[in-house]
Amino acid sequence: MHKLTRRELAAGLSASAVLLARPATAQTPAAPIPSNAAEELKASEAQLRETSDQLDKFPLPMSAEPATIFKP
């Protein structure tokens, strides 16, 4: 089993973010722009849920460290 470094993990996550953010293809119709705030909130929640489900497919060990350090 290959152990991922923080740089490899960051590169993989940024690559997956690019793939998830790519424009919709002809096979996946683009969602219409919501007309009011309530619809926009529901659409955002659905997109967040879908993205979370996609990210859950990739195992991430608890020992993985973030690439940045947050200082107050």
Image: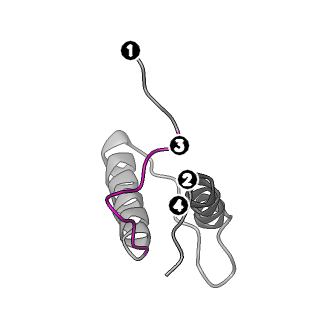
User: Which amino acid type corresponds to the residue marked 4 in the rendered image?
Assistant: Pro
Where does label 2 land, which residue? 6
Above or below for 69 versus 16: above
> Which residue appears farthest toward the bottom when viewing the image?
27
Residue pictured at 46% horizontal, 31% vertical: 69
Nearest to N terminus: mark 1 or mark 3: 3
Residue pictured at 36% horizontal, 40% vertical: 37
Residue segment shown in magenta: 58-67
**Relative image position of residue 41 (x, y in whole percent):** 34, 47
Quadrant of the rendering where the C terminus is positioned: top left
From the image, give the main secondary structure of the stretch colored magenta. Answer: loop
Where does label 3 land, which residue? 67
The label shown at residue 32 is 4
Nearest to N terminus: mark 2 or mark 1: 2
Instruction: Tell me, yes or no, whether the two marked residues, 3 and 2, touch with CB atoms within 8 Å.
Output: yes
User: Which amino acid type corresponds to the residue marked 1 in the rendered image?
Assistant: Pro
Where does label 1 land, which residue? 72
Give the SS element for disc 2.
Answer: helix
> Which residue appears farthest toward the top when viewing the image?
72
User: Which amino acid type corresponds to the residue marked 3 in the rendered image?
Assistant: Ala
Q: Nearer the viewer, mark 4 or mark 2?
A: 2
Nearest to N terminus: mark 4 or mark 2: 2
Instruction: Tell me, yes or no, whether the two marked residues, 4 and 2, touch with CB atoms within 8 Å.
Output: no
User: Which amino acid type corresponds to the residue marked 2 in the rendered image?
Assistant: Arg
